[in-house]
């Protein structure tokens, strides 16, 4: 089968990780165009990946040697680029969050359906092997019925200069980091029914209203409760943790650790003596980024080549956005918000 041609738009931290990931699956895909509005950035990276450099993505969408448009632009620019790519008949991988409004998300999903192209949101947390293992264990009822789920994303990444992350459209950390956790929790636990949230600017010293810290309480449709804590203002090494408490056992997952997952269970057939740490492919921060991004782009390329539905389809990614937007609504009203 021929290699798929890829054009990446936006060459910041995410775009360069995507470029490196395609480079690791050179037998299946090849980066043919790197596009960034910063000409120097586009040209220097194009030299590294032996690709063509462009500064305006509208000029690359008609290229016949591009099968996949990979969008790594700031959140609020995802929708316009994805819709243009769909209209040009290109398959689309777009970074998380899918968009910043539900209307944009709907328009993107509709455009991809109408064009008959594959559409996936690059939610790398779905491709962290420890997360996939935790989901499998829950699906197999290894810890019984999960009644409490907690997830944290604690990083030191608070903006230190004005940019798109301090602009009103970016909203804040609740969206930026929360959406990872809402995706993973809904993937494992099913849909969220109701949220109550606080979100504040507590550490960022810039002139912005965007939150850098948030605490979100969740009630799932299956009756279980949950909590998500995020901050970009931590001064320690990052922590990215998932805790699943079931009626027969517990799973604790943390990307900080060499062995990222441990569990203990009294479930018949799965009993453990104390905590057990299964072997799973992992590297502590930042190593898990390369693993999950490579798994993610390879999954998407395979979906295009084999005509399969991507794991993080538009509807699942929109569901994570919906929880984040309802959480912001709760912050505004001071009341719990139904996720409908
Ligand atoms: N999955 C993850 O863990 C992860 C990690 C980082 C970023 N992201 C996501 O990736 C997206 C980008 O984030 P980032 O941290 O890479 O941002 P960034 O600021 O580092 O990079 C954005 C790039 O886009 C370019 N750009 C902006 N407007 C453009 C335009 N109209 N045309 C061409 N280029 C343009 C900028 O010059 C910049 O190089 C965000 O949506 C973010 O949520 C995801």
Image (cartoon, helix red, strand yellow):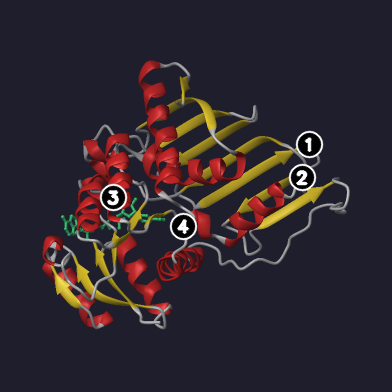
Task: Tell us which disc is closer to us: 4 or 1.
Answer: 4
Q: Are marks 3 and 1 in contact (CB under 8 Å)?
A: no
The residue tagged 4 is: 309
Q: Are marks 2 and 4 in contact (CB under 8 Å)?
A: no
Say few, some or many: other residues with alpha carbon within 10 Å of mark 1 (under 14 / 14 to 19 / 20 or more): some
Q: Are marks 1 and 2 in contact (CB under 8 Å)?
A: yes
At x 46%, y 40%, the residue is 230
The residue tagged 3 is: 114
Apparent side of residue 296 relative to residue 58 in the rendered image (left or right): right
Task: Tell us which disc is closer to us: 3 or 1.
Answer: 3
Ligand 1 in which quarter: bottom left
Quadrant in which residue 16 is drawn: bottom left
Residue 75, above or below 49: above
Apparent side of residue 302 relative to residue 132 in the rendered image (left or right): left
What whole-number distance in Å separates the C-alpha atoms at marks 2 and 3? 42 Å
Say few, some or many: other residues with alpha carbon within 10 Å of mark 4 (under 14 / 14 to 19 / 20 or more): some
Say few, some or many: other residues with alpha carbon within 10 Å of mark 2 (under 14 / 14 to 19 / 20 or more): many
Which mark sits nearer the N-terminus, 1 or 2?
2
The residue tagged 1 is: 247
What whole-number distance in Å separates the C-alpha atoms at marks 3 and 4? 15 Å
Residue 72 percent across, percent down from the top left: 29, 58
What whole-number distance in Å separates the C-alpha atoms at marks 2 and 4? 29 Å
The residue tagged 2 is: 143
Residue 307 percent across, percent down from the top left: 44, 65
At x 20%, y 46%, the residue is 162
């Amino acid at each position: 089968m021929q290699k798929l041609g890829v054009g990446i738009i936006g060459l910041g931290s995410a775009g360069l990780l995507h470029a490196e990931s395609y480079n690791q699956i050179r037998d299946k895909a090849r980066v043919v165009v790197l596009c960034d509005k910063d000409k120097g950035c586009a040209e220097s990276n194009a030299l590294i990946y032996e690709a063509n450099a462009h500064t305006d993505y509208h000029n690359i969408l008609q290229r016949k040697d591009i099968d996949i448009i990979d969008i790594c632009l700031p959140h609020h620019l995802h929708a316009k680029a994805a819709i243009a790519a769909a209209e040009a008949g290109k398959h689309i991988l777009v970074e998380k969050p899918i968009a910043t409004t539900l209307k944009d998300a709907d328009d993107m999903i509709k455009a991809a359906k109408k064009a008959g192209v594959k559409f996936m949101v690059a939610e790398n947390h779905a491709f962290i092997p420890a997360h996939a293992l935790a989901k499998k264990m829950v699906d197999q009822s290894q810890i019984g019925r999960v009644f409490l789920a907690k997830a944290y994303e604690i990083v030191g990444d608070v903006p230190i200069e004005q940019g798109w992350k301090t602009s009103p459209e970016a909203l804040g950390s609740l969206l930026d980091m929360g959406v990872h956790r809402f995706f993973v929790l809904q993937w494992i636990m099913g849909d969220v029914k109701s949220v109550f949230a606080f979100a504040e600017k507590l550490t960022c010293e810039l002139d912005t209203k965007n939150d850098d810290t948030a605490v979100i309480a969740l009630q799932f449709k299956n009756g279980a409760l949950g909590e998500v804590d995020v901050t970009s203002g931590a001064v320690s090494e990052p922590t990215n943790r998932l805790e699943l408490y079931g009626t027969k056992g517990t799973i604790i997952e943390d990307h900080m650790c060499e062995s990222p997952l441990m569990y203990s269970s009294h479930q018949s057939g799965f009993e453990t003596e104390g905590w057990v740490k299964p072997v799973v492919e992992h590297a502590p921060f930042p190593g898990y980024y390369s693993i999950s991004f490579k798994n993610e782009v390879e999954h998407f390329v395979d979906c295009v080549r084999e005509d399969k539905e991507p794991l993080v389809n538009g509807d699942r990614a929109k569901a994570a956005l919906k929880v984040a937007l309802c959480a912001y609504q709760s912050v505004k009203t001071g009341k719990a918000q139904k996720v409908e």
